Image (spheres, rainbow, N blue to C red):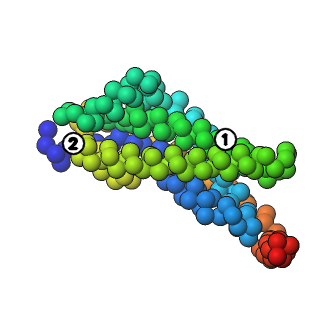
Amino acid sequence: MNTETRSSTLVWDLPVRLFHWLLVLCFAGAWLTAESEHWRLVHVTLGYTMAALVAFRIVWGLLGTRYARFSSFVRGPSAVLAYLRSLSGPKPEHHTGHNPAGALAIVGLLALIAVTTATGWAAYSEIAGDWLEEVHEVAANGLLGLVVIHLIGVVVGSWVHRENLVRSMLTGRKPVPQAEGIRRGWATVAALMLAGVLGFWWVQWQSAPADTGAQMSRASHEKHEDHD
């Protein structure tokens, strides 16, 4: 089979790809607005969006396409160690979907996002004391660290296997035999997901008080004056 034919194989469905890039956008935005009172509503909105995306990914991990399902890539510690050892050998293990090490990072990311968003919601709702804010911050820092590890893994995997993993998450295609691909991209599910996210953002924007920005700016200014 020639390279051109192999490179046209659809592996990642559109819901998985959209989930991935929406999560990247939301995490980056939430991180950049974490310390700003002025952008608090944006931070909260992005956090809630991340929680909803994780909930969707769990469902899609049970009902989705071949490589989206947890059963196709979540493996035990022995499989993870075997994969990592193979990277230094002449024939590294190749996986059409997520490799065992990448799968471990994905499960960790989903779990940490759940903890981060849950504690953020509880702190924002003032359900408990200040200790929840500390837990939220620790979880967010841990999430950032795991994101960095994931990025390193993507770079290493792309280099070792001679395939652009970032591009494959954009196009959904990888250089593998056609028999290993999926039959459809499930664009309808992706469209519904995107409509839900954009609709939620619109509702949040419409429900925001018109003077929220001015109030937050004054509160921030008064806080700095108290510290002085």
Can you tell which quarter of the image residue 183 is in? top left
**Which residue position is annotated with label 2?**
6
**Front residue of this view, candidates 76 and 2:** 76
Q: Secondary structure at mark 1?
A: helix
**Front residue of this view, candidates 49 and 81:** 81
* Residue 198 visible in this rendered orientation of the protein: no
Instruction: Say which amino acid is labelled 2.
Output: Arg
Mark 1 or 2, closer to the camera? 1
- Return the x and y of residue 152 as percentages of the image width and height: 39, 49
Q: Which mark is residue 57?
A: none
**Which residue position is annotated with label 1?**
115
Q: Please tell me which residue is depicted at 53% across the width and 29% down the height of the picture.
A: 62
Can you tell which quarter of the image residue 118 is in? top right
Q: Please tell me which residue is depicted at 35% across the width and 40% down the height of the picture.
A: 11
From the viewer's perspective, tell me whether residue 21 is left or right of residue 58: left
Q: Quadrant of the C terminus?
A: bottom right
* Residue 36 visible in this rendered orientation of the protein: yes
- Return the x and y of residue 179 as percentages of the image width and height: 26, 32
Q: Secondary structure at mark 2?
A: helix
Q: Please tell me which residue is depicted at 39% across the width and 29% down the height of the picture.
A: 80
Q: Quadrant of the N terminus?
A: top left
Q: Please tell me which residue is depicted at 70% across the width and 67% down the height of the picture.
A: 36
Instruction: Say which amino acid is labelled 1.
Output: Val
**Front residue of this view, candidates 36 and 98:** 36
Number of numbered tags placed on the structure image: 2
From the viewer's perspective, tell me whether residue 207 is left or right of residue 139: right
- Return the x and y of residue 99 as percentages of the image width and height: 37, 35
- Return the x and y of residue 106 as percentages of the image width and height: 49, 39
Q: Is residue 38 above or below residue 45?
A: below
